[in-house]
């Protein structure tokens, strides 16, 4: 019984470790000019299920988003940013 519990715990741990590995997308967004723009984008993305981290670089015009690919997709992220008023012009990286 004890071996069975240890085996189940190991399987569960591996599943959690896999699920905890986020996918990262770097999106180029237009019209980002000030810190308020960053806040607006962060708030919009915080409402998307599966988004775990957002980094915005105003100078580069990029939004880097870490997300759970089982819960959302890169096109959903791009649409969310665009609907917040910052059109995504292209998708630079995904992975």
Image (cartoon, rainbow, N blue to C red):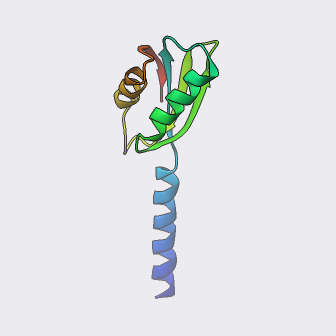
Q: Is residue 19 left or right of residue 58?
A: left
Residue toward you, 81 or 7 = 81
Residue toward you, 5 or 37 = 37
Residue drawn at the location 46% of the way across and 51% of the way down: 19
- Residue 12 vs 53, above or below: the answer is below
Residue drawn at the location 52% of the way across and 45% of the way down: 21
Residue 76 position, x and y percent, is 35, 30
Residue 84 position, x and y percent, is 42, 24
Q: Residue furthest front?
A: 36
Residue drawn at the location 50% of the way across and 82% of the way down: 3
- Residue 71 vs 12, above or below: the answer is above
Q: Is residue 76 left or right of residue 58?
A: left
Residue 8 found in image quarter: bottom left
Residue toward you, 12 or 46 = 46
Residue 51 position, x and y percent, is 47, 40
Residue toward you, 45 or 11 = 45
């Amino acid at each position: 019984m004890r071996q069975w519990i240890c085996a189940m715990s190991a399987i569960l741990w591996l599943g959690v470790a896999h699920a905890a590995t986020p996918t990262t997308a770097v999106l180029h967004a237009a019209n980002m000019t000030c810190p308020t723009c960053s806040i607006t984008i962060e708030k919009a993305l915080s409402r998307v299920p599966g988004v775990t981290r957002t980094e915005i670089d105003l100078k580069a015009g990029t939004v880097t988003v870490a997300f759970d690919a089982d819960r959302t997709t890169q096109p959903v992220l791009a649409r969310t940013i665009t609907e917040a008023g910052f059109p995504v012009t292209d998708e630079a990286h995904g992975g």
